[in-house]
Image: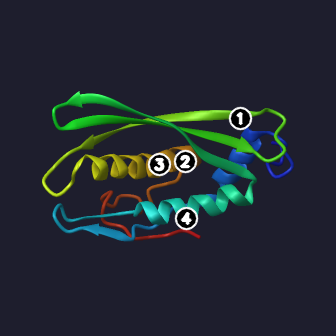
Amino acid sequence: MPNPKKDKTLAGALLAAQAAIGAIGKDGHNDFSNYDYVTAETMIARSRAVLIDQGIVLTAGNVELIPFSDDALIVRQTMVIRFEGALDGETTITRDWPAVVQKGRPLDKAVAGALTAGLSYMLRDLLLIPRGDEPGAGLDHSRSDEQ
């Protein structure tokens, strides 16, 4: 298998980032629904460190708001991925996430929340980050963090 650290392609850099990230422990708790989760801030910070270490640049691209219902939109965000010194250019990832207006959450806050949640899950998918749960444990009961 080629050494991903010496690979001069975006795919090689992503492979190295995926190998380096490990699981991220849950550091937030939803009192209303009683479950633990990884906060977007933690997901972004940990992912950012690994991406920077591998020379991967992730920037926000276009955002499209697609009507869905009277109180909801689909927020479609495209992220651009580049590799410092890449031989293979850049690629994009597009993610759709719902933005639902509710009491105490006007449209602007719903859209901002959708952008943040979409970014967090896109990073989890891009870097293949494990959920951090112990084998056999419920998905929302573990706070383990592999480093």
Q: Gap between marks 1 and 4, in whole Å?
A: 22 Å
| Tag 3–tag 1 contact (CB < 8 Å) | no
Q: Quadrant of residue 137?
A: bottom left
Residue 119 numbered mark, or none: 3
- For label 2, the crowd category at 10 Å Cα-Cα, with few meaning under 14, some 14 to 19 and many 20 or more, is some
Left or right? Give the position of 29 relative to 75. left
Q: Which residue is mark 4?
A: 45
Q: Residue furthest left?
A: 103
**Which residue is at 44% across, 56% downward?**
131
Query: Marks 4 and 3, how far apart in space?
Result: 12 Å
| Front one among 5 and 141 | 5
Residue 113, numbered label: none
Residue that numbered label 2 is attached to: 128
User: Element type at marker 4?
Assistant: helix
Q: Secondary structure at mark 2?
A: loop
Q: Nearer the viewer, residue 112 or 24?
A: 112
**Vertical placement of 10 versus 45: above or below?**
above
Q: Which residue is depicted at the point 35% across and 58% down?
A: 136
Q: Which residue in the protein does label 1 denote? A: 90
